[in-house]
Image (spheres, rainbow, N blue to C red):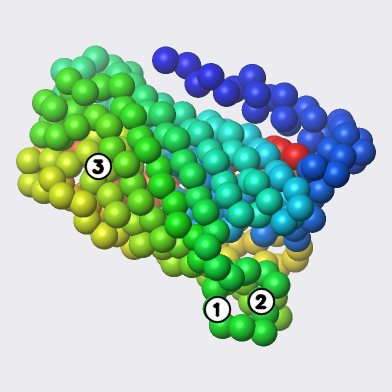
Amino acid sequence: MRPPIRALALFLGLVALTAPAAFAGELFDGGKLLATGGVSQVEGAGGGGLTSWAMITGYGSNDGIGANAHYTAVQLPDYNLHTAGVAVGLYDRLELSYAWQGFDTQDVGGTLGLGRGFVFHQNIYGAKLKIIGDAVYDQDSWLPQIAVGVQHKENDRPAIIAAVGGKGSVGTDFYLAASKLFLAESLLVNATLRETKANQFGILGFGGDKHNAYSTQFEGSAAYLFSRQFATGVELRTKPSNLGIAHEGEAWDLFAAYFFNKNLSLTVAYADLGNIVIKDDQHGAYLSLQAGL
């Protein structure tokens, strides 16, 4: 199964590089500060690479909208993860997103009897609603921007998921995120609580032979802005360990993001996803390109 949005990602990239500002018109007003929409999280939401933020994606203000497309690759010692997606932010209030993931098992697939290069695919449909606060403009208040979100995930390998102990190939995550930007200190912090049954973000299904109930997991991130265009930071994300086949630990990364302008950004990171099935120490390079209006 090929990602249906690669052509759109290429189109948005070309538009970002060549279209005049007037093309966007009043609808794509670009009224938010550079970098405040975040980048594209690995499941498609606006945020960091691993964590979902309360920020609404794109640069549309209360009177406009923003849209973007992204492509992300995570190169691990024994696996590869590729994800691509599109997202739209409506009036800095509502975010809608779609992401496609392909998880390549490489030689591990052969070891497990699946065949070398066996690939899990996942479709993720997301929505996020800002409910209170403004991370940027409420500088005179300690109240963060708070949003609620949902990510519905559909995996295309139900038979394999059942074979490793997973209870389902379709699942839904719910999360509550709080983000705050301290402009004077050039610091952004975020904390998210996620209710989930997902194994390895859903790549290995939902629930398992050890646990089959929702659990509360934590996502945290902090970013320092060296300039309007360049930020570095760290992220941590805990995950449930539902499968008896292997213990699943937390994931974390160290990242750097460069915002060329409001139309194009590049994120690079060192990401550590811990144990994945029979392989420990799955850490490596994370690269993500985002383009939009």
Looking at marks 3 and 2 on the same chain, the residue that comes earlier in the sequence is marked by 2
Q: Nearer the viewer, residue 122 or 109?
A: 122
Whether pointer 2 and pointer 1 mark residues with C-beta atoms closer than 8 Å, the reply is yes
**Label 3 to label 2, Cα distance in Å?**
37 Å
Looking at marks 3 and 1 on the same chain, the residue that comes earlier in the sequence is marked by 1
Amino acid carrying mark 1 in the image: Leu
Q: Position of residue 276 (x, y in %)?
A: 25, 41
Displayed quadrant of residue 151: top left
Q: Which residue was labeled with disc 1?
A: 143
Q: Which residue was labeled with disc 3?
A: 199
Q: Secondary structure at mark 2?
A: loop
Amino acid carrying mark 2 in the image: Asp
Q: Position of residue 79 (x, y in %)?
A: 35, 32
Circle 2 packing at 10 Å, graded few (<14), some (14-19), many (20+), is some
Whether residue 260 is visible to the viewer of this picture, yes or no, is: no
Q: Nearer the viewer, residue 34 or 22?
A: 22
Question: Disc 3 or disc 2, which is closer to the eye?
Answer: 2
Which residue is found at the position 33% from the left and 47% from the top?
Answer: 173
